[in-house]
Structure formats: structure tokens, C-alpha cells
Image (cartoon, coloured by chain):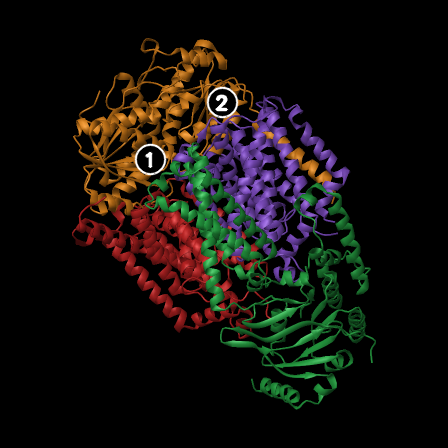
Chain colours: A red, B purple, C green, D orange
């Protein structure tokens, strides 16, 4: 172990930076879970796969996997848009027909879609880890942005943090100050009542999926760049952890997802750094289970509705 | 009476099936014989697992995404007891089942109050933690080195080393499990489970101790999973954490979704269709596609939920 | 007027309060129902009638107040002092499980592979116990039995390893423990603590403190049946199965009995089928034994629910708007049934809006408004009560404004 | 619906499809199955195995086959998964035309398939599984690759004696291969006086190594030993560089893969390998040339070892015919340097456990290409 105080503290700082980066990525994914859950009370298990899709699409477009290599910015834009579309399609094909079915059916469908998409990616891109070709990525991303002592913060980390913060602020603005946001909140309160008030529920749900999946896609691209690794099973673990973050923050709450993501990212990095690196994933699971058992409403969630019927 | 139960009470239905299953190892299958028997053994094993899983989501209506954890616990219990103490399979089977039941109760007791999705997530997390422990605690489980060289099953001192012998062994276990599950389903206990699945509050109001019956369901389900695991370890003669991936839980779930949740014969049918199918697909699909053949399973789940949520052999009361 | 024998007080509440967050749904309601009596509970919408029912059969926990049913106290409000006591007991109890540690490890030490499993098992044991002990006031009979067993085993454990203290020596963890000399006296204290705890569980005072479990199923077993405003049936089960489920709390067959088809379990099953059929005949569903509950007409569903409640052999029935959605002839039938039941000595507490229905049927009426009991007495007296008229008119004014 | 008939028909269909699928078409050719992960994360290793086998197949058939009969390589993909491996193994074990299997890359897959081969009396050669247990458990399993413990020892010695490292950190994946390596390396390092300043682990399916690498950075090791596989190793190295960790990296044969060549950060990485393409006689040059020609790829050691394993299998069949017992006996008879099989990876002969004794070689990345390290340790 590092011995001097300076080393200890710079290690701590470095881990903190790593944790915040990871956390902001989790937050971006978690928002997708939380928005969908808030609106239609469904854990969209396939959300992790959308994130994976974002990474793969941007990789493919940039590296010319589909025949043409596009400029970075264009490729990323297209990837995010396709992800948003994929989210909408997912809802349209898999979940919408089950709106009136028991929740269990929708949940199982979500798992089925997750398996399907993961294997589809395996079929298209193969199981290997893919890396973005260095040549097409803006070079500055890999340069250190800040360096004090041993602690290095790369531009990529800065970009990830900034992107996450900006997107979250925009999202909050959308949810609180637009017609769409108002409709979303109305549906979250009471779907039937919202429909009676003239809210087009299906369309709002589609927009919700589009927004959530778009953010998931952004997270996928950022992760693909950050670790320089894109592979079909990446969505599974990240998805679960992001879900844990959403639960921790209180599912259904967007600020909760942000906070949960941050906490989870830090917990994971510090857990791996200070406790045991092989139980890094376990920490996420353990937090998730504990939160569900002890405080299912999470940090910011509404208290879970009374289990009793209303008579 | 359940439509489902006709399979178990109507001689005309079950006798031919039983005969086919019983004489299967002696059918003239030529050189493919041992291979077919192995696949049949695997199918029967998954039938046992499907029956076990069915108890929780099928009977009590709680989605269990971590069933493979109990399968793993059973397999590792059997593997460790065999490697270190060389105990007989017949001693190990009940011990493994007990150990499984213990962990089933430990997992279930705190999550009694949870509803659908949160329960599913907790079960998932729990089994992932179990597998993580198995992977990392080298001194106990040898972690990713696996435990090779486990002794074969034996009966009265006779080592069962022929494929047909293990086939009959798992067949025996399956019949045992079926016997228990069918009996319980049609009893006061099974009725209580169905009541809980339908309406927990109404169940409580007619005097059913919901917590207790849920716990019994968890214990029974986990015990069956662990029983299958114990057999699996002795049959495979090697256990490794990679054998108990999350995917296995989904596969078992797939079996009961296909057959119909809560339907005992449905779970059998699901395994009968899907387990050989995975083998057939492996053979007929080219290599690049065969690794992605689980795509079909995902699709299957989605399609079933969309068009036949009650499964191929739905549970219906006549 | 009627030839019914009104018996002793069966149900009595005293200053029952239920709050949901800031909203007080039930405000200090005190009422009583006697055996064989038909009592109606009326009040405008949202007056808290159904919530009161939920409190009575313990679907929700009242915030304060007491309920006595059939001589048993259902709710015992836990005071801060009680809570402290419970907390301390829980701590002692959880600590007791540590007694197992040296023994288990001492026995298993040579077989080193079981270290983690033993430790994990113990940790889980501890957690599990904490989970069990935390709501000591909500103990059910069977979990109390379990606790007794635990305490006994702890005591035995302690006794065993006093006799062979070399168990200590084998556990390196205890070697590191600086208070080694204190362990044995400590263990003796724990042992005594265990005994005291054991005694306390069986002391009447403690029994009262940790009273009867506030759970609907236990209350049902005590003899309080209930129906719901919108029939809550097991819709995919047959009518007969629904009613047999009502028999559930009067049967005992356990896991082994059913699996092995022991004669006792079989007889019980036949018996419960017979009784269930009888109940169904009584409410007039004798011909629809095997139809799916979900496929029955609404009126039939309501009657099925009544049959299910009857199958639990209740001393008292809580009926929540039993005639809502029934046509006049059906409701006349129901009135007849209710009369027969009350003649058999079953107390009936009934929520109803239909004043005519109440006037014909009820012996006494309680009126609830905004959670408060505003009037009680004979139907005739209630009809002319100023407060009641005000409440109804005022309530309708209020709804018109809203 | 008549459920019974439905079930019967169904069972019949399943049986039919099974037997149809599993009965091999009768062929004149001698079948040599090769099982490895050809898809999935380790596909690039499997690729080497496949290509090596196919190259040897071509070569044997071009020279008239084995005693006049052509050879056919049957590829079986097992994804490095124990269950898949067992299923594949069962198919081979019960196919009377198969007298020897080449295969299984991952040790977990090999260990799962091992009891099945053993019961069927089917000999097998693994070109890549280095787990020490394999030889002990079955007398039907042979390998023409060294064991983990040997490799670990060797690496420690090389790091200490040739590279003169003083402080080394170990970064290992939680799998059988890496754990074996790590243990052997640690033990040998202790003996040699090489300081292990830290050991961290990572799980197979992760791509985030920053937490552990940050820790390494503060430990200031001379080098980091990556015990694991190439796909992760390339990520580890990139992430380490982006964190400003400037020390050297080295690894074992699991890192010997072309994927690292694409990574400019991996310059200077050195690994052990059983095979060097640029050092060896005319046969090796021939092999490399043919390989490049056929697959337009650089051969890795998996290809070379598989090439030799298939060669040994062919030699055994040529000598004793299509008989599992005799083939096993022939292989077991290759037990001393004099009787050794001379292949492109040097002389291969087995000890009583079926393990082989082979030299380990070192190669490194220079200017984006694999080259032999200037100094070898013999």
C-alpha cells in the first residue's frame, strides 16, 4: 500500500475522479430506467442493451464497419438518434401491447428483449472486444486536462462529466418546464386521469423512451471512448448497476438517479480500490439489495404507494 | 381439477409417455444412442429445475430471476462433500436440498414484503452475489479453477457409470419431484399459494398466513434446485462458476414461460421442447450463428408474452 | 320484535385512531358490537368506514387506541418504554446467537473448508434473528415458538461449551480477544439472560406487552370474517376452491401430511369440501360449485364472497356494502341470509348507504363523518338526528362545490 | 385437444431430430475434431487454433493423406463454456469414427470435457490448456504446451534475471489460468528476491480497470505483470497510460495476440510464448509462409501448437490405425527426448501425466510488430 500521506491522498483523489466519471455514466443510464419506470412502472431490462447499441453504432459508423467511415461528430449524432428510435421501437413492439397485462408479463418481456438484443449484437458484431480506431477520435480527448501531482484528469473525463451535467440539467428543464414534461409527470401520477385530461399517453410514453434511450446511447458512446472497449455483453453489467443507481436514488426520480449514479460509481471505485477488487460488482448488488429491503423508496423516491387497495 | 392434472391422473395420458421415457435408453438409436441419452438426461435435469422454479413464479406469482443460485449451491454442496468426505450420493442429495432450502429461506425472509419487480431484482442480485462468492472464495470452492474429479453417483455400492444408469437416476429424481409438486399443488398448501398469487390481501383476510406460505414456497423451490444441482455435480463430475451464469436462470424461466407459468405439465413440455432444441440448433447452425442461438430464446419469451401469456399448456380449471 | 338472543359484547374499540401521513382517517372511534347483533355503519363517502374495517381486522395497524375482540386484545399500542424494552431484548437475543460461534467453529475446525460457510451461516443467523426480533410486538404464535426454540438451543450451546472450554482454544478469533478471562462469566450471564428471556416469553405480563399479532389472518382465525366493497375473490379459481380457501384456517394438514397423503390430511380435505359445499348451498350457489369465480355474475360473486367468509366459521362478519350492485330481489335474499346468520349468533357489522335497507335490518346504527363517530343508536333515532342530517346534506353540498 | 397424443408426437419429433442431427454422414475421410471457442471474446485465439488445424489438414491431404485416406478437420465451437464443452465432447465421445480430439482452449472447458473423454476411452491433445490439474486427472489427456506453473516460474526468472526488475505488481483476471500463473509467479519471485508490491484482480466481463491501476500507480512498480488474456490486456495498458502509469508491462502466453499490435501504448510489452515465428529452422519459415499465404495473417502460438497437435494425431493414426486405445498407447509411448515428435514448436514428448516439457520463449512488441526478445533465458 502507498505509505506517505501525499500518496494516500492523491490516490484518494484519483479514485474520486475515476468514481465521479463512472458515476456520471451510471447516472446517464439510470435516468433511462427511472424515466420509464416513473411513467409506466416497468423496469426496462433492455435499457442496458440500448446503451450497448449506442456504443456499437458509433463504433461502426466511425470505423467504417458498415462500409463507410463517417466523421466523429456526425457518427455520434446518428448513433444517439438511432438509439432514441430503437427505444421507441422497443416500446412499440414489445411493451405497448402489454400495457394492460399484468406487470409480470411486461417484466418478462423486457428480459426477453434484453436477451434478444444482446445476442443480435453478438450476431452482427461478434463477441470480440472492439476498440475505436485512434485516428478518427479527436486527439485532445486523450490528453490530460488537469494534472496536479500524481492525479491525472483526462479531457475525456472532463467531457464525460460535463456532458452528464449538461444533459441532466436539460432533462430537468424538459421535465419541469415543457408541455411534454408536464404530460409525463401527469401520467406518472395517474395514467387514466391523464388520458381523460386529453394527454396522448402513448405518444408521451414514446417520447419518454426516446429521451431515456438517447441518453443511454450517449452513455454508451462515452463509455466506449473512455474504456475504448465495445462488446455485446457490456450492457448487461452496466445496465444492472445503473438500475441499482436508480433504485438507490429512488426509482422514478431524476435527481435521485443522478445522485444514485454518483454514489454507486464512487462506492464501486472505492470498493475496488480499498476493499476488494474482485467484489467490485458485488458492492453494487449489495447496495441494491440493501436499499430495496431497507428503504425501497430510495433517497428521493416517493414513498411506495400503500399496498392496500383504496376502498 | 386442473386440466394440467389430467396428465398425472389419467392413465391413458401418462402411461404411453411413461413407457416412452422408461424404454428410451433401449431404443435402437444406433451409434447416436449414448448422445441421445445424454441429451435426454439433460432434458430431464432441466425438467426438475423447471418444476422447482415453477413453485415460486408459477404458484405464488413472484418472479424469481436468481434460480441458478440454488442450482449452484446444490452443486457446490455436493461437490465439496464428495471431494472431501466421499459421502454417498444418497446422503448428499437430502443434505444439498436442505442447504438449498436454508438459503432459500434466508433470501426469502427479508423479501416477503416486496412485490413483483423488486422481488425479481432482489433474487437476481442475491444469486449474482452467491456466484461471486463461489468465484472468489478460492479456499472453499477453488473459485474459477472449478472442482474436477468428483466421484460418479452410486447405488448400494454400485457405481453408476453407464449413461442409461444416470438417466434412470435423474428420471427417478424427476418422478419424485413431480410427485411432491403435484401432491402439494392440489392440497391445502397449493390452494393457499394460488390464493396469494391472485390476491394477497384477500388471502390474508380468509385466514392464510401469507408470510409462512411464501417461505414454504421459497424453501421448496430452492430445495428442488439444489437437488438438481447435487445430481448435476455428480453427473458432470466437474463444477465451475461459469456453469451457473445468469443466463441459466433465464433459460429455466424460458422453459416455464413456454409451457405456461404455474402449469406442471407445461414446465415439462417447455424443457422437452427447448433443451433438445438448443442441441439441434448447435448442430444445424453454422458456428457464427450457433453462439447467438439464444437470440431465439429471447424472441420466444417476447412472442409468448405477447400472444400466449398463459403458455402452451395453460393452467385452467375445468 | 325479533326472536334473537343478543349475547355479550364481542367487539369493542376504544378511541381508535388511524392516520395516513397528515390525514386522520379515523378519529377516536369507540364502538361495540354484541354477539348476534346486526350493527350498521353509515356515513358519507370518504368518512373512513372502510378504513375502520381495515383497522378492525388488522389489515392496517391503527395509530393508537385499542380493539378487543372475543376477549382478546388485538392492538397493543407500543409506548416508547415498550419500544426500548423490545430493543434491549432484541439485542440480547441477537447476541445470544454468538454462543453458537465457538461451538460451531470448534466442532468444524478440523474440516477447514467450512470456515466461511460457518461464519456466513452465523452472520445470516444473526441477521435473521434480528429480523425476527425487531418486531417482537408483532409475533405470531409460530414465530414465538421458533424464538423459544432458539433461546433453548442457545442455552444448551452455552451449557455445552462451559463443559468443554477447549472449544475456545481452537478458535483463533477468540485468542485475539483480550477479554478472554471475561468470557466465561460473560457466557454465564448470557445463559441466565437466555433463561430470563425464555421465562419472559411465557409470563402473562410479557404476553400482554407483546400481545396478539396484528395480522388479518390471525384475526380471521379468531373469528372475524369480512367481505369487501368490490368483491375480492380468487378470480381464476373455481367457486368451490374459493370457499375451500376459507376453510384453510380451520384445517391443519401440513407439508408432510399432504405429500404422503396421510389419512388425516385426506379426511380433512374431504371434510373441507363438504363444509365448503354446504356454505355455497347456503348462499344459493349450490349449482355453481365448479364455475370459475371470475365467470360468475356480479351478484353471485358477492354471495360467493359471503360464503367464503362464512367458511372461516366466523363469530362476527364485517360486510362492506354487501348489496351494492344487486337487484332488489337479490338484496331481499341477502337480507334473509343475514337474518339467519345473526339468529345463529353471528355478530354482523355492515357498511351501507341504502337507508331503507338499514332501517329494516339493523339493531343499532353508528354514523361516521370525517372519521368521527357523530351519532349512534336505533335506526329510528338516527333518522331524526340533526347532526346526521347535517353531515349528509353538508357532505353533499361539499361534493357539489368540489 | 388430445394432450397425450400431442405429447407423444412431440416426443417422437424431438427424438427424430436428435438422431438425425447427431448421426454423422458416412464418409471415407478420417475425422479429427478440433474444439475451441471460435466465437465470443476469445475468438481470436480460436482463430489461430482453427487456422493451424486447417493448414495441417491441407498439408497432410496434399501429401496423400494418412495411409491413403484423407483427413477432415471437424470444428466445434464451445465458447470457452464448460457446459458447451461437455455437450461438444459428448458428441465426439460417442462418435465411433473419432479416435482422437484436439482441443479445448480454456482449462475450464478442458476440465469439463475430460471425464467424458476418459469414460469413452478417447484420447485428446490440448494445444492450449495450461492448468496443472489436467494431466493428473486423466491418462487420456495429453498436451503439447507447458503448464501454468512452469510458465510462472519462467516469467519470474526472466523478469528478475534478464530485465532486472526489482518491484513488480501483478494484475490478474479471476480465472483458472491467471490464478495458476499468479501463484506460480509469486512463489518463484519470492525465491528470487523479486518484490511483489501489489496484486489486484479483475473480473472477466469488465472493461474498467482504473480503480486498480490508480492503486498501482502509487506503488511505483518497475513493471506490471498482466496475468490474463489479450482483449483485456490491451485495455489495461491503454487505461494505465491515460492515468500516467509509465512502467513496463509483461504477460504470459495469453497476451500473445495480434490485437495488442493495434495499440500504440503496448509498445515494449513482452510475453512468454511456446513458439517464435522469426526464430527457427526452415520448417518454421515454411509454416509461417504458408500460413500468411492462406490466411493473410501472422501465425500465433495457438496456430503453431495446434498445427503440431494435429500432426501428432495424424502420426499416431498413421502408426497404429483407427483405434482409440492404440492411439492413446502410441501417444503415451512418446515419453523421452529420443522418441519425441519433431514439430515446428520443437520436440514434444510427454511425461507420465501426459504433460510436455518445453522451452518457453520471450517475444516483445517493437514498432507495432511481434519480434523475439533479444535476450532469451534458457
Q: Is residue B41 visible?
A: yes
What residue is rendered at 37% in x and 54% in y?
Answer: A79
> In the rendered view, does D28 fall on the left or right side of D203?
right
> In the rendered view, does C181 fall on the left or right side of C142?
left
> In the rendered view, does C117 fall on the left or right side of C147?
left
Return the x and y of residue D120 as percentages of the image width and height.
Answer: 52, 20
Return the x and y of residue D180 as percentages of the image width and height.
Answer: 34, 30
**Chain letter for the residue marked with disc 1 in the picture:** D
Return the x and y of residue A308 as percentages of the image width and height.
Answer: 58, 66
**Chain letter for the residue marked with disc 2 in the picture:** D
Answer with mark 2 or mark 1, whichever residue precedes in sequence. Answer: 2
Mark 2 lies on residue: D117
Return the x and y of residue A186 as percentages of the image width and height.
Answer: 48, 71
What residue is rendered at 70% in x and 61% in y?
Answer: C294
* Label 2: which secondary element: helix
Q: Residues within 10 Å of mark 1 (few under 14, many from 20)?
A: many
* Label 1: which secondary element: loop
Q: Residues within 10 Å of mark 2 (few under 14, many from 20)?
A: many
Q: Nearer the viewer, residue B70 or D23?
A: B70
What residue is rendered at 70% in x and 83% in y?
Answer: C377
Instruction: State which quarter of the image contains the N terminus of chain D.
Output: top right
Mark 1 lies on residue: D229
Q: Are marks 2 and 1 on the same chain?
A: yes
- Quarter-wise, where is residue D37 in the image? top left
Q: Nearer the viewer, residue C282 or A72?
A: C282
What residue is rendered at 25% in x and 19% in y?
Answer: D280
Instruction: State which quarter of the image contains the C terminus of chain D.
Output: top left
Name above or below for residue A2 compared with residue D31: below
Q: Is residue B65 visible?
A: no
Q: Which mark is residue B80?
A: none
Amino acid at each position: 500500500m502507498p505509505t506517505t500521506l501525499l500518496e494516500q491522498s492523491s490516490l484518494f483523489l484519483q479514485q474520486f475522479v475515476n468514481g465521479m466519471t463512472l458515476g456520471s455514466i451510471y447516472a446517464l443510464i439510470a435516468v433511462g430506467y427511472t424515466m420509464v419506470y416513473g411513467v409506466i412502472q416497468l423496469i426496462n431490462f433492455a435499457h442496458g442493451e440500448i446503451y450497448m447499441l449506442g456504443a456499437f453504432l458509433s463504433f461502426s459508423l466511425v470505423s467504417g464497419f458498415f462500409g463507410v467511415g463517417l466523421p466523429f461528430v456526425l457518427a455520434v449524432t446518428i448513433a444517439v438518434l438511432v438509439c432514441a428510435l430503437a427505444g421507441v421501437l422497443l416500446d412499440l413492439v414489445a411493451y405497448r401491447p402489454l400495457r394492460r397485462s399484468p406487470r409480470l408479463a411486461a417484466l418478462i418481456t423486457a428480459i426477453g428483449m434484453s436477451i434478444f438484443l444482446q445476442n443480435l449484437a453478438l450476431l452482427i458484431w461478434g463477441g470480440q472486444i472492439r476498440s475505436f480506431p485512434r485516428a478518427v477520435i479527436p486527439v485532445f480527448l486523450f490528453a490530460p486536462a488537469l494534472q496536479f501531482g500524481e492525479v491525472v484528469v483526462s479531457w475525456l473525463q472532463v467531457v464525460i462529466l460535463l456532458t452528464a451535467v449538461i444533459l441532466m440539467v436539460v432533462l430537468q428543464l424538459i421535465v419541469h418546464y415543457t408541455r411534454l414534461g408536464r404530460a409525463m409527470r401527469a401520467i406518472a401520477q395517474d395514467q387514466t386521469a391523464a388520458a381523460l385530461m386529453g394527454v396522448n399517453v402513448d405518444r408521451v410514453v414514446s417520447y419518454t423512451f426516446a429521451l431515456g434511450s438517447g441518453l443511454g446511447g450517449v452513455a454508451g458512446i462515452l463509455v466506449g471512448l473512455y474504456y475504448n472497449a465495445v462488446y455485446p455483453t457490456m450492457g448487461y453489467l452496466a445496465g444492472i448497476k445503473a438500475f441499482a443507481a436508480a433504485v438507490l436514488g429512488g426509482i422514478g426520480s431524476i435527481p435521485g438517479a443522478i445522485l444514485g449514479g454518483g454514489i454507486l460509481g464512487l462506492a464501486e471505485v472505492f470498493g475496488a480500490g480499498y476493499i476488494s477488487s474482485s467484489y467490485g460488482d458485488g458492492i453494487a448488488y449489495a447496495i441494491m439489495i440493501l436499499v430495496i429491503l431497507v428503504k425501497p423508496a430510495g433517497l428521493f423516491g416517493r414513498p411506495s404507494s400503500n399496498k392496500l387497495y383504496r376502498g | 381439477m386442473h386440466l394440467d392434472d389430467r396428465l398425472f391422473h389419467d392413465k391413458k395420458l401418462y402411461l404411453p409417455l411413461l413407457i416412452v421415457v422408461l424404454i428410451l435408453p433401449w431404443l435402437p438409436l444406433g451409434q447416436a444412442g449414448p448422445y441421445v441419452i445424454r441429451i435426454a438426461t439433460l432434458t430431464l435435469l432441466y425438467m426438475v429445475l423447471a418444476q422447482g422454479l415453477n413453485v415460486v413464479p408459477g404458484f405464488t406469482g413472484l418472479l424469481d430471476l436468481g434460480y441458478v443460485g440454488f442450482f449452484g449451491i446444490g452443486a457446490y454442496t455436493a461437490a465439496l462433500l464428495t471431494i472431501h468426505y466421499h459421502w454417498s450420493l444418497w446422503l448428499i442429495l437430502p443434505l444439498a436440498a436442505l442447504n438449498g432450502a436454508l438459503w432459500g429461506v434466508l433470501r426469502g425472509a427479508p423479501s416477503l414484503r416486496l412485490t413483483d419487480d423488486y422481488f425479481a431484482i432482489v433474487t437476481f442480485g442475491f444469486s449474482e452475489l452467491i456466484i461471486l462468492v463461489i468465484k472468489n472464495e478460492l479456499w472453499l470452492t477453488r473459485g474459477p479453477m472449478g472442482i474436477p474429479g468428483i466421484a460418479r453417483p452410486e447405488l448400494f455400492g454400485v457405481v453408476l457409470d453407464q449413461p442409461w444408469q444416470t438417466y434412470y437416476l435423474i428420471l427417478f429424481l424427476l418422478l419424485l419431484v413431480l410427485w411432491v409438486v403435484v401432491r402439494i399443488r392440489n392440497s391445502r398448501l397449493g390452494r393457499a399459494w394460488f390464493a396469494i398469487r391472485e390476491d394477497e390481501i384477500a388471502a390474508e383476510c380468509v385466514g392464510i398466513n401469507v408470510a409462512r406460505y411464501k417461505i414454504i414456497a421459497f424453501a421448496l423451490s430452492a430445495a428442488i434446485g439444489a437437488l438438481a444441482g447435487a445430481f448435476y455435480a455428480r453427473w458432470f463430475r466437474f463444477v465451475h462458476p461459469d456453469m451457473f451464469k445468469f443466463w441459466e436462470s433465464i433459460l429455466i424461466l424460458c422453459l416455464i414461460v413456454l409451457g405456461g407459468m404455474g402449469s406442471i405439465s407445461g414446465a415439462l413440455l417447455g424443457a422437452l421442447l427447448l433443451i433438445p432444441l438448443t442441441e439441434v440448433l448447435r448442430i444445424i447452425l453454422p458456428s457464427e450463428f450457433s453462439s447467438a442461438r439464444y437470440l431465439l430464446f429471447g424472441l420466444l419469451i417476447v412472442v409468448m408474452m405477447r400472444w400466449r401469456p398463459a403458455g402452451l399448456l395453460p393452467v385452467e380449471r375445468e | 320484535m325479533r326472536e334473537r338472543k343478543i349475547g355479550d359484547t364481542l367487539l369493542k374499540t376504544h378511541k381508535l385512531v388511524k392516520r395516513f401521513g397528515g390525514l386522520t382517517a379515523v378519529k377516536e372511534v369507540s364502538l361495540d358490537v354484541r354477539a348476534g347483533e346486526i350493527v350498521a355503519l353509515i356515513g358519507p363517502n370518504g368518512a373512513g368506514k372502510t378504513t375502520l374495517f381495515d383497522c378492525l381486522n388488522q389489515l392496517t395497524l391503527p395509530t393508537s387506541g385499542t380493539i378487543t375482540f372475543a376477549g382478546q386484545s388485538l392492538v397493543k399500542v407500543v409506548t416508547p418504554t415498550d419500544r426500548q424494552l423490545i430493543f434491549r431484548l432484541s439485542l440480547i437475543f441477537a447476541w445470544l446467537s454468538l454462543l453458537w460461534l465457538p461451538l460451531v467453529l470448534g466442532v468444524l475446525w478440523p474440516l477447514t473448508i467450512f470456515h466461511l460457510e460457518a461464519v456466513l451461516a452465523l452472520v445470516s443467523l444473526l441477521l435473521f434473528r434480528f429480523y425476527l426480533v425487531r418486531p417482537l410486538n408483532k409475533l405470531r404464535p409460530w414465530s414465538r415458538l421458533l424464538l423459544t426454540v432458539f433461546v433453548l438451543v442457545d442455552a444448551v450451546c452455552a451449557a455445552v461449551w462451559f463443559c468443554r472450554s477447549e472449544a475456545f482454544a481452537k478458535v483463533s478469533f477468540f485468542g485475539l480477544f483480550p477479554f478472554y478471562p471475561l468470557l466465561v462469566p460473560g457466557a454465564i450471564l448470557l445463559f441466565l439472560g437466555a433463561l430470563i428471556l425464555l421465562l419472559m416469553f411465557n409470563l402473562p405480563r410479557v404476553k400482554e406487552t407483546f400481545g396478539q399479532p396484528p395480522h388479518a389472518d390471525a384475526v380471521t382465525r379468531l373469528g372475524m370474517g369480512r367481505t369487501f366493497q368490490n368483491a375480492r375473490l380468487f378470480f381464476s379459481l373455481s367457486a368451490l376452491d374459493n370457499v375451500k380457501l376459507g376453510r384453510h384456517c380451520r384445517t391443519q394438514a401440513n407439508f408432510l401430511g399432504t405429500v404422503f397423503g396421510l389419512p388425516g390430511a385426506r379426511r380433512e380435505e374431504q371434510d373441507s369440501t363438504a363444509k365448503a359445499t354446504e356454505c355455497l348451498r347456503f348462499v344459493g350457489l349450490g349449482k355453481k360449485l365448479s364455475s370459475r369465480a371470475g365467470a360468475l355474475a356480479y351478484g353471485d360473486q358477492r354471495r360467493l364472497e359471503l360464503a367464503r367468509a362464512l367458511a372461516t366459521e366466523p363469530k362476527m362478519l364485517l360486510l362492506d356494502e354487501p348489496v351494492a350492485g344487486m337487484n332488489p330481489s337479490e338484496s331481499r335474499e341477502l337480507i334473509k341470509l343475514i337474518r339467519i346468520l345473526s339468529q345463529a349468533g353471528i355478530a354482523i357489522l355492515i357498511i351501507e348507504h341504502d337507508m331503507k335497507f338499514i332501517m329494516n335490518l339493523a339493531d343499532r346504527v353508528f354514523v361516521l363523518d370525517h372519521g368521527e363517530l357523530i351519532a349512534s343508536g336505533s335506526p329510528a333515532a338516527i333518522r331524526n338526528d340533526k347532526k346526521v342530517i347535517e353531515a349528509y346534506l353538508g357532505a353533499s353540498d361539499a361534493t357539489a362545490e368540489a | 385437444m388430445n394432450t397425450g397424443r400431442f405429447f407423444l408426437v412431440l416426443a417422437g419429433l424431438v427424438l427424430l431430430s436428435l438422431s438425425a442431427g447427431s448421426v454423422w454422414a458416412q464418409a471415407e475421410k478420417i475425422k479429427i475434431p478440433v474444439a475451441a471457442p471460435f466465437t465470443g471474446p476469445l475468438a481470436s485465439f480460436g482463430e489461430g487454433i482453427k487456422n493451424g488445424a486447417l493448414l495441417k489438414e491441407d498439408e497432410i491431404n496434399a501429401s496423400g493423406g494418412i495411409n491413403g485416406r484423407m483427413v477432415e478437420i471437424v470444428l466445434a465451437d464451445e465458447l470457452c463454456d464448460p457446459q458447451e464443452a461437455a455437450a461438444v465432447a459428448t458428441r465426439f465421445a460417442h462418435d465411433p469414427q473419432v479416435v482422437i480430439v484436439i482441443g479445448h482452449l480454456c482449462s475450464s472447458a478442458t476440465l469439463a470435457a475430460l471425464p467424458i473423454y476418459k469414460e469413452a476411452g478417447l484420447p485428446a491433445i490440448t494445444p492450449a490448456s495450461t492448468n496443472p490439474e489436467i494431466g493428473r486427472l486423466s491418462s487420456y489427456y495429453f498436451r503439447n504446451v507447458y503448464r501454468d506453473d512452469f510458465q510462472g516460474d519462467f516469467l519470474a526468472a526472466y523478469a528478475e534475471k534478464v530485465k532486472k526488475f526489482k518491484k513488480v505488481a501483478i494484475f490478474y483476471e479471476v480465472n483458472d489460468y491467471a490464478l495458476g500463473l499468479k501463484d506460480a509467479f509469486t512463489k518463484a519471485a519470492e525465491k528470487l528476491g523479486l518484490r511483489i508490491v501489489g496484486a489486484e484482480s479483475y473480473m472477466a466481463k469488465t472493461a474498467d480497470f482504473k480503480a486498480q491501476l490508480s492503486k498501482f500507480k502509487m506503488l511505483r512498480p518497475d513493471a506490471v505483470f498482466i496475468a490474463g488474456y489479450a482483449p483485456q490486456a490491451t485495455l489495461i495498458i491503454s487505461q494505465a497510460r491515460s492515468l500516467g502509469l509509465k512502467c513496463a508491462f509483461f504477460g504470459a502466453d495469453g497476451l500473445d495476440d495480434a490485437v495488442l499490435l493495434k495499440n500504440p501504448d503496448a509498445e515494449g510489452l513482452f510475453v512468454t510464448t511456446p513458439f517464435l515465428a522469426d526464430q527457427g529452422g526452415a520448417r518454421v519459415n515454411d509454416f509461417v509462409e504458408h500460413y500468411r499465404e492462406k490466411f493473410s495473417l501472422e501465425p500465433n502460438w495457438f496456430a503453431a501448437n495446434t498445427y503440431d497437435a494435429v500432426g501428432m494425431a495424424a502420426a499416431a493414426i498413421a502408426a497404429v490405425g483407427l483405434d482409440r486405445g492404440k492411439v492413446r498407447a502410441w501417444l503415451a509411448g512418446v515419453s523421452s527426448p529420443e522418441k519425441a515428435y519433431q514439430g515446428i514448436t520443437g520436440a514434444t514428448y510427454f511425461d507420465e501425466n501426459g504433460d510436455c516439457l518445453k522451452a518457453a520463449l520471450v517475444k516483445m512488441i517493437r514498432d507495432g510488430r511481434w519480434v523475439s526478445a533479444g535476450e532469451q533465458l534458457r
